Amino acid sequence: MSATIIDGKAFAAKVRAQVADEVSQLKSEHNITPGLAVILVGEDPASEVYVRNKGKQTVEVGMNSYEHKLDASTSEADLLALIDQLNNDPSVHGILCQLPLPDHLNEDLVINSIAPEKDVDGFHISNVGLLGTGQKSMVPCTPLGCLMMLRDHHGSLSGLNAVVVGRSNIVGKPMANLLLRDSCTVTIAHSRTKNIEEVCRAADIVVAAVGRPEMITGDWIGKGATVIDVGINRIPAPERGEGKMRLVGDAHFDSAKEVAGAITPVPGGVGPMTIACLLANTLTACARANNLPEPEGLTA
Ligand code: NDP
């Protein structure tokens, strides 16, 4: 039997609609408009598209969007000065510095200079520590989106065996911490894991975050398991014409869906949830900054 397809595009639209409702209430009842500042250093074309999408969606849900495009040669001191200014600007509730940064800028230093309560990417060392110790924090957007879809599909995640394939700081590790917080039994697999297929096959939930096109095939998946595919890989698609490319995940969708109980597609799964969760995090940061109740269901 073929798996249920978890529609991340539709889910993200629902999250954005909830955020838009809450923003409209904040405006009418408290005269507050959440604001998200995005900093882009340099001219990486993929980052430019991503930042443009963020800005567009921020405005669509009724928030203020502040874009700061800096030259690739911007000095660390100038970037830190801008972040300091945004940290102290009460109209800015979320700050995101688009990664990767040019080589001459120290990424850790830059991220850790963002005020933790405005760190809507959840990468600041304080937020990493708070998440790791099960305290209230800003949660990285991609793992938060995965968690929302898993909670929606399963209801309670308590007691489920979850395998996260990938141990990066931005996806694998925070994902594992979130699943642990929801009382899953969590295994983190990586490039040195022995018998990785077997490890995955024993799981109720497999989160694939490896960056290797279609690596996780159907024979890695236990019958009825849920597969959350974080991967975004561009591969040649000669069937679409010369030089054409297509997007695939880290899971092999066609074989995995024949065994899994549920699976997220690529595109249209985790991807759209990431920006939706960025907006959700900005709203949460704004509510916390104003001592207002946090929106329901939009945080971990
Ligand atoms: P990283 O490259 O930082 O991490 C990849 C992880 O996968 C590493 O921990 C690595 O292990 C592990 N890995 C690599 N090869 C293997 C293998 N053969 N077997 C087992 N584990 C392996 O990637 P990210 O976490 O940043 O991203 C992962 C994927 O998610 C990418 O496809 C990326 O494009 C996508 N992504 C999607 C987002 C979205 O919005 N949907 C957002 C962010 C990322 P080790 O540590 O041992 O080297």
Image: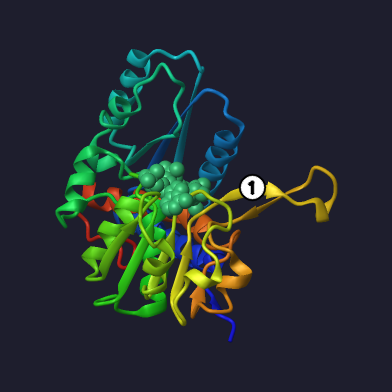
- Label 1 crowding class (10 Å Cα cut-off): few <14, some 14-19, many 20+? few
Q: Which residue is drawn at 58% across and 64% down?
A: 252
Vertical relation: 224 (above or below) 214: below
Q: Position of residue 291 (x, y in %)?
A: 18, 52
Residue that sits furthest to the front in the current view: 194
Q: In this view, does 72 lie to the left or right of 139?
A: right
The answer, for residue 61, to whether it is visible in the render is no
Q: Residue at x 53, y 79 (%)?
A: 259
Q: Which of 17 and 258 is in front in this view?
A: 258
Q: Residue at x 57, y 75 (%)?
A: 257
- Which quadrant of the rendered structure holds the N terminus? bottom right
Q: Position of residue 78 (x, y in %)?
A: 36, 15
Q: Position of residue 90 (x, y in %)?
A: 28, 36
Q: In this view, does 158 lie to the left or right of 152?
A: left
Q: Residue at x 26, y 31 (%)?
A: 112
- Which quadrant of the rendered structure holds the C terminus? bottom left
What amino acid type is highlighted by mark number 1? Arg
Residue that sits furthest to the right in the current view: 241
The answer, for residue 222, to whether it is visible in the render is yes
Vertical relation: 169 (above or below) 163: above
